[in-house]
Amino acid sequence: GAGVSQSPSNKVTEKGKDVELRCDPISGHTALYWYRQSLGQGLEFLIYFQGNSAPDKSGLPSDRFSAERTGGSVSTLTIQRTQQEDSAVYLCASSPHTTEAFFGQGTRLTVV
Amino acid sequence: TQLLEQSPQFLSIQEGENLTVYCNSSSVFSSLQWYRQEPGEGPVLLVTVVTGGEVKKLKRLTFQFGDARKDSSLHITAAQPGDTGLYLCAGAQGFNKFYFGSGTKLNVKP
């Protein structure tokens, strides 16, 4: 596709369940980011993948959060044993070898 | 703590007024970007500045990068309701890694 694609667009889950969020970056972009955004506020960095390098996981809030990027393309963010405070919009962005990030529309996660 | 601090956090003005949003840090960035985000959408890039002291204009928007490449400002002249949104600054350190500010939520009333 032409842009960054995220799925699902909305996800409602019960507290304690695991969820998987998917990101399809723009083809050829070597860098991929996951961010979390609460209530239209600023972006909270979660994790960063760059090519074949080890990912920068310094933003993951707890060990319930993990992410992988297969074949340098599609990425999955997994949240285990979801809590209500995990409710937020999860944004994925990809970047080429320039100083610009292209964002998907996000996945709105609601934990009830 | 945020690497980039934006101010103000919220701004509500009347159509036709001017405004300035600030993005400050104690760190040096190789480049700095400004994004605008509308409800239900991801942020969209407005501009990238890379040289200390650089000024870029995009219609009614003027962006400035500080001489020391630690801060930036966004000035909007004669704001319009279509300018309403969340404005985010982002700084790059090293190759491709971005740090985002906390955002400024702008509401322009007709």
Image (tube, coloured by chain):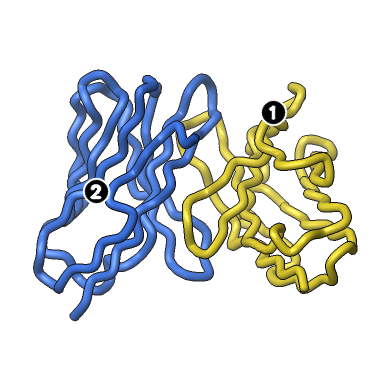
Chain colours: A yellow, B blue
The crowd level at tag 1 (other Cα within 10 Å; few <14, some 14-19, many 20+) is some
Task: For residue B11, say whether it is visible.
Answer: yes
Name the residue type under label 1: Asp
Q: Nearer the viewer, residue B90 or B23?
A: B23
Q: Determine the CA span between mark 1 and mark 2.
A: 30 Å
Considering the numbered disc 1 on the image, is that residue within a helix, a strand or a loop? loop
Query: Which residue in the protein does label 2 denote?
Result: B21
Q: Quadrant of the N terminus of chain A?
A: bottom right
Q: Are marks 1 and 2 in contact (CB under 8 Å)?
A: no
Q: Chain of mark 1?
A: A
Kindly identify the residue that appears in the image at 65 percent across and 56 percent down: A90
Give the quadrant of residue A48.
Answer: top right
Residue sitting nearer the eye, A23 or A46: A46
Residue pictured at 38% horizontal, 59% vertical: B86
A5 displayed left or right of B61:
right
Horizontal and vertical percent position of residue A56? 69, 28
Residue at 34 percent across and 49 percent down: it is B46
Residue A28 in view: no
Q: Which residue is mark 1?
A: A56
- Which quarter of the picture shows residue B108? bottom left
Of B73 and B3, the residue lying toward us: B3
Q: In this picture, is A88 found above or below B52?
A: below
| Secondary structure found at label 2 | strand
At a point 82% along the width and 52% down the height, the residue shown is: A79
Q: Are marks 1 and 2 on the same chain?
A: no
